[in-house]
Amino acid sequence: MVCRSGGWYPEPQSLWKDLKGQPLPSLPGKCFRDENGLFQTESVLIVTENSNQNLICTIRNNILNEEEVSSVYIADSFFPKVSHVTVIRLSLNLLVLGFFIPLLIYCLRKQHKEKDSLRCKLKDFEDKLRFQVEKEKEKYLAGFVLRKARRFAVNVTLDQETAHPELWVSKNLKSVKCADITGEQPKDLDIADSYRCVLGSERFNSGRHYWEVELKNKTMWHLGVSSESENRERYKSIAPEDGYWAIRLWNGEYKALSTPQTTITVETKPTRVGIFLDYEAGELSFYNLSDDSHIYTFRYSFPGTLRPFFSPGIHGSKEDAPLTICPVIDWQ
């Protein structure tokens, strides 16, 4: 409570009392002069719920024996009573809030994690979908190129004179397999160490050429082209720098015999392979005809004449399944 009074001279004194005239403790009074030179006084009393309801503020000038008195009554409604029921309700509300706030925080965190998980799943789905679209585009493109390549089909036959001694070539010069060699091993170590290979009779030094080879159930083979050279006698190293551009299946693994070698992943095991040579473009491409997918493409500036190249196995192989040159159907 604040008691103010003005127009005093000399400086007055202020005092708070109860109804019985007993002084009440208050804050130190403030007194200051106004523009007319008269004194203004202000006294503050701290009122609590337990304070006396009847209060008297007295301003007195002891020199002039003047006094002003003002009384005030503080009603009960000034300090509203808090019932036990209100306290219990407030406690219950705080208890409920103490339970639900952590629960709300947990739910929000869980929702956030679920959103993150959903976002990750959506990203994975988008990546898989994008990958699938790319695969379908590649498959469609490979099928389109393959249909165009079949327009350049050539009738390839095997050159018996270039066949390895441990190979058997069919009479129609369309099939080759490992011969059933018994008895002593070859005395010529070069033959024993070399691949079992045979070349095609056709020679290519320009243009586009396509042929197909059936693999059946073979577990080991080499297919491609070879440079016609006097150094190509024992087939010891099948690599571009030695005049060979080929892919192979060996020990269950598909590889392009590039430098360095390239591991090939196929979705469907090829039982028939299409080979397309575009001499001027410097490209030799292989296609899996089991699903019309692209296998691998060599890009090279071919030196001189090229010939088809076949190898059904290596020295010591017991596999007698043949490689067979097939007629190209529906290519026009």
Image (spheres, rainbow, N blue to C red):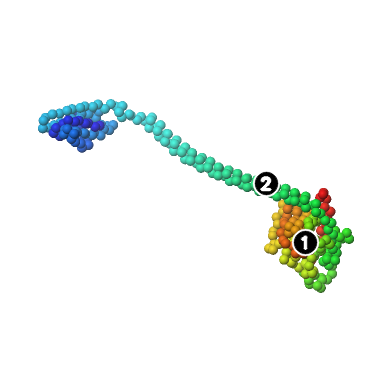
Left or right: 14 as drawn, with respect to 328? left
Q: Amino acid at mark 2?
A: Val
Task: Give the secondary structure at mark 1.
Answer: strand
Vertically, is 14 above or below 130? above
Give 163 or 66, whichever is nearer the viewer. Answer: 163
Q: Which mark is residue 225?
A: 1
Q: Nearer the viewer, residue 101 or 139?
A: 139
Which corner quadrant of the image does residue 5 belong to?
A: top left
Q: Which residue is mark 2?
A: 133
Q: Residue at x 26, y 27 (%)?
A: 74
**Res. 40 visible in picture:** yes
Residue 330 in percent (x, y) is at 82, 49
Quadrant for residue 285, please give it. Answer: bottom right
Secondary element at image label 2: helix
Residue 203: % across, % down: 81, 62
Residue occupying image coordinates x 38% and y 32%: 87
Q: Give the Cα separation between the discs numbered 1 and 2.
A: 33 Å
Instruction: Tell which circle, 1 or 2, labels the residue nearer the N-terminal end.
Output: 2
Residue 167 image offset from top left, x and y in percent: 83, 64
Q: Amino acid at mark 1?
A: Val
Asked whether residue 309 is in view, the answer is no
Observer-nearest of 296 and 71: 296
